[in-house]
Image (tube, helix red, strand yellow):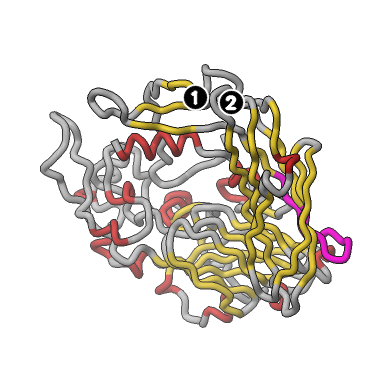
Amino acid sequence: MKKLLSLCLLILLPITYVLAQTNGRICLDSQEGHNGNSIWKMQKLDKIDVPAEAISEVGYDDSQWLPAIIPGTVLNTDVFNGEVPEPYYGLNNKVQKNLIPDITKVGRDYYTRWFRTEFYVPATYEGKQIWLQLDGINYHAEVWVNGNLLSSIHGMFVQDYINITDFVKPGQKAALAIKVVPVDVPGTWKKKDWGAFKEFHNGGDGNIGVNTTMLMSIGWDFTFMDGIRDRNTGIWRSIYLYATGDVALRHPFVKSELRHPNYDQSSETVSVEVVNPTFTAKNCVVKGEIEGITFEKAITIERGCTQEISFTPEDFKQLTIQNPRLWWPVNKGPQNLYDLDMTVSVDGVICDSLHTRFGIREIVSDTNTPDHSRVFYVNGKKIFIRGSNWIPEAMLRSNDA
């Protein structure tokens, strides 16, 4: 039941996060595999005989490296270049075939790889704070820019914002090199002695669970009992380049509280993170607008700090919406969405802005039933969960389509 609840909540999550991230950013997706604008290369750890400082400098000779697919895993690039066969053709993925090396047999160093690319920093970024945004690397990573180690990442679902202002020059090329290391304990497949009659007993010896990573990589019913040979090691989500003024905005969120019993009034609480990467405190004004409803707040944010600020309906009466357009599940009503725009300014000059969308709805559940099964309510109406599921492609080869 816990799995069902988690799945249902996942299906109903707001789309705020995804849409906010494409706002005014230059995507560094690869030409290979994604038709992006960046040329990425990949090389095995044991074939690198120079220090990381050299690899991450502009002009480093990577002509002997393999073309890489970013975002993508090590196995994505290996398959693309014909280093190993397509796992999901015939029996290629069977461990016994030994066509694709398994990390438990060849070790973590085998799937430790360097990825690198070079990119132009727009001349319009002069005088601004320049950022790299990394949305997901599995599992450990060193991030080098122009010969400098700027970040270390640990965890598949970590989102990292790296201030590269002091290490690049607007109007010139910069080099980005990322060393990617697999999970600490890759685990191995192991048949379980529990499960429904005739059901495949989802595999794994449990050891991969010590890592915050995708458990399915070890071997699940839809990835076959043999799992994913590299445990999905790689830069599996996009990397973005963007610039802001001295203050930046991140992670907008809107919380709705609907009035009972008619659900004819909604009180909105808007929150956002304000980031000051500079060495001096900044007096700034954060403004927001929801379809003509405006609100703003003046704050002082200390140097090097991140501060979450909130706009509540108690302080801003205009954030109480009468007769809101409610969001409903498919086949139960329209999926109405509202637009939220926010800016932060210093001395009247806008430093950063963002746009996102959100739905006004209330989702609750209880187990007040004879058999204690869970019932979901959306906007006060019982919703029958008919059953739904979404799983990623086993090697995380995804695109918008």
Residue 359 appears at what percent x and percent y?
61, 34
Q: Quadrant of residue 88?
A: top left
Q: Is residue 110 magenta?
A: no
State the residue lying farthest toward the left.
193
Q: Residue at x 25, y 47 (%)?
A: 226
Relative to 194, say whether 79 is above or below.
Answer: below
Instruction: State the residue position of label 2.
Output: 263
Q: Quadrant of residue 351?
A: bottom right
Q: Range of the magenta residues?
A: 343-355
Residue 269 appears at what percent x and percent y?
64, 45
10 Å crowding of disc 2: few (<14), some (14-19), many (20+): some
Instruction: State the residue position of label 1.
Output: 380
Residue 248 appears at what percent x and percent y?
72, 62
Question: Of helix, strand and loop, which one carries label 2?
Answer: loop
Are discs 2 and 1 less than 8 Å apart at CB? yes
Residue 335 appears at what percent x and percent y?
60, 26
Q: Nearer the viewer, residue 90 or 371?
A: 371
